Amino acid sequence: MQFPTPCNPIWAASANWGDKRLEFLPVSLRLAGTPVLLVGGGGVATRKARLLLRAGARLTVVSPAVCTELQVLLDEHDGVWQQGYYQSADLHGKRLVVAATPEASVNEQVYHDAMRLSIQVNVVDAPHLCTFIFPSIVDRDPVLVAISSNGQSPVLARILRRRIEALLPSEYGRLARFAGRFRELVKEAIQADGPRRLFWEQALEGTVAEQVLLGREEEAERKLREQLRDTNALHSGEVYLVGAGPGDPDLLTFKAARLLQSADVVLYDRLVSPAIVDMARRDAERIYVGKRRADHSVPQTEINQLLLDLAQQGKRVVRLKGGDPFVFGRGGEEIELLAQHRIPFQVVPGITAASGAACYAGIPLTHRDYAQSVRFVAGYLKNDTVEHDWASFQSRSETLVFYMGLMGLPVICAQLQAHGRSPDTPVALVERGTTLEQKVLVGTLADMAEKVAEAQPAAPTLIIVGDVVRLHSSLSWFGSAPG
Ligand code: SAH
């Protein structure tokens, strides 16, 4: 006798399923208009009621008392509260029952009655008394992800749910509805199954999807139609200028993580932590274009050109920038050339070094008592000088944050004093902010240059000037905090 050879992994995996018994089979129930009984009126019952009502169930709650929240829910959805204790007759005409009372004996009775009448039953927190269970759900209606641990560990299921929540953009449902709207159109245009699937895969992971997720459905539709007419358009590249935050990989945005996962090529520099670059797909090409102050590994014009070339080759390019791309990130320059060549691009904000370093160092950038404004200043300018309108930096109630200021620090401190800021104005230098190596050095305008010369901090460093620095010793919890 000949057995078919498993020819693809999915087939092979399904062939093994027979060996392992599934405790529960995940299915989706259509409950609209279905009579359902809920036994119990407390908090747990309320959570189940909310789900059942959302699915359109015709709900009857039997319980001597119900909490206010449940009462409101029932009123809003034409549910019925049948005041009193559960009796077997309450199951009459019901298709499904959920028991959520604190009384084990009542719950058990509900279970036995339901089994006798072949009604589907769920007893909360008692999987052995259930013919169905409620999975944890990630709701991106109409996309739903259900996670179940067969009642073994609801907490684990919830942890998993949170992880999946983080993976799926909140507007994912919009994407599904969009795809639904054009399903027939695409089916007519591409009749063969394989190419049609490929078309959708690319559309739902490419520019079309990005536009939908941004709420620009008209633009998405235009793009989709263009790609349907001209399959070459499908392969046009795009560039994402993505803020990678100041160092701690956990400070990456969900959007940045998602785009990183979809990139064919990732360009990064010295300020981006390796853990973040590692989040790219394993087969993605990684290009280091790192810049140090003195060592411009790849000149800016070449980076701009490289972005353009890669996009024109049809690649999906993520350019990772430390912090925020539009804060001293030359993000503007990098997209100028792309815009001129009509390459689609997006700029994704990141947490800028000032926010990150200040939070992790326990220095609020503004504070009702100390500072009503904050200014981000370049501490190092194009021609190796620090030229500013120093007279405009006098306000004691303004916090100043100098980026790229380590070399210029003595000049900065001297100029601020020369233009009216008191010599005892507190200054903090945050070294490698938000990373495990973060260090904070605190001094004043008068003595900071000397302290820094002695401590020899390692780049990147940020300088914070102003009375808010006084809060560092009481609010910091991270890194060493002398002073
Ligand atoms: N676009 C970036 C800034 C790039 S300019 C942002 O928004 O953060 C580079 C300067 O940023 C560095 O010279 C340093 O002053 C500052 N910087 C970046 N990361 C830092 C970090 N982890 N700790 C302290 N300063 C940092």
Image (tube, rainbow, N blue to C red):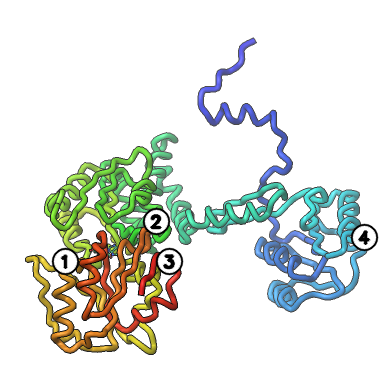
Q: Is mark 4 within 8 Å of ligand 1?
A: no
The mark that comes first in sequence, 3 or 2, is 2
Q: Nearer the viewer, mark 2 or mark 4?
A: 2
Q: Quadrant of residue 159?
A: bottom right
Mark 2 highlights which residue? Answer: 249
Q: Quadrant of residue 44?
A: bottom right
The mark that comes first in sequence, 3 or 1, is 1
In the image: residue 303, left or right of residue 36: left
- Label 4 packing within 10 angstroms: few (<14), some (14-19), many (20+): few
In the image: residue 283, left or right of residue 454: right
From mark 3 to mark 2, how far is it between C-alphas?
16 Å
Quarter of image, ligand 1? bottom left
The mark that comes first in sequence, 1 or 2, is 2
- Relative image position of residue 393 (x, y in whole percent): 19, 84
User: Considering the numbered disc 1 on the image, is that residue within a helix, a strand or a loop?
Assistant: loop
* Count of all numbered marks drawn on residues in the image: 4
Mark 4 highlights which residue? Answer: 88
Mark 3 highlights which residue? Answer: 478
